[in-house]
Amino acid sequence: MSILRKGLKGAPVKRLQEFLGIDADGDFGTGTEAAVRQYQQDNGLAVDGIAGPDTFSAMGLYELILLRVGSVGTAVKNLQKGLGIAADGIFGGGTEAAVKEFQQANDLSVDGVAGPNTLAKLDTFEEVTAETVRKSHVTKEEEEQFEAEPLPNLDGINVTAESDTPVPQPEEASVWGKVKGWFS
């Protein structure tokens, strides 16, 4: 699932830190974790120090919402309702298939991942507007400071790059561009 937690680095982390009013260095360390916990506690959310779709929704950071297989919660329920499928709040294979079908029907990139472009087309995500989609993009300059960072160890799985060959990047990419690849 696409979440921000201790050990991750990049433009999404920096945006979260800016919202929280803490040092925005793009490195999710103990200070960021403590600030997320405090925000969650102050706003009636599950307190785990991990920023995921429901925390982003509460913060109004809709540009950081990225729902994929493994995601759970209210944002997933809203996605499922918008797709017209059973809304259990668990993003599994059936939801992924429905997202792909929706993306195909709406001339979107068909990847089964519901980010701002997909969510903006659903009636159940009125907060996700054209402005949100615009905010979900970062320039090459915004992300390049994090390019040399090692990939994090996620859930005990050591995620490593397959090649040292740089992959060409478009001038503007999703705020989740690098992070999204960690979960592929």
Image: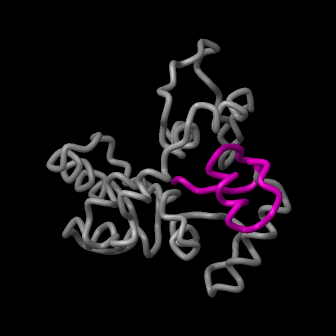
Q: Is residue 55 left or right of residue 158?
A: left
* Quadrant in the picture for residue 35: bottom right
* Observer-nearest of 88 and 41: 41
* Quadrant in the picture for residue 6: bottom right
Give the residue at x 54% y 65%. 61
In this rendering, the answer to whether 165 lies above or below 34 is: above
Give the residue at x 53% y 71%. 60
Q: Is residue 57 left or right of residue 32?
A: left
Give the residue at x 26% y 60%. 121
Q: Is residue 125 magenta?
A: no
In this rendering, the answer to whether 30 lies above or below 45 is: above
* Observer-nearest of 99 and 61: 61
Q: Is residue 18 magenta?
A: yes
- How many discs appear? 0
In this rendering, the answer to whether 29 lies above or below 85 is: above
Residue at the limit of the structure toward the left, as seen here: 105
Would you say the magenta stretch is mainly helix, strand or loop? loop
Q: Position of residue 62 (x, y in %)?
A: 48, 64
Q: Position of residue 179 (x, y in %)?
A: 58, 42
**Colour setup of the view:** one colour
Where does the magenta region start and end?
A: 1-27
Q: Position of residue 19 (x, y in %)?
A: 67, 65
Q: Position of residue 146 (x, y in %)?
A: 71, 35
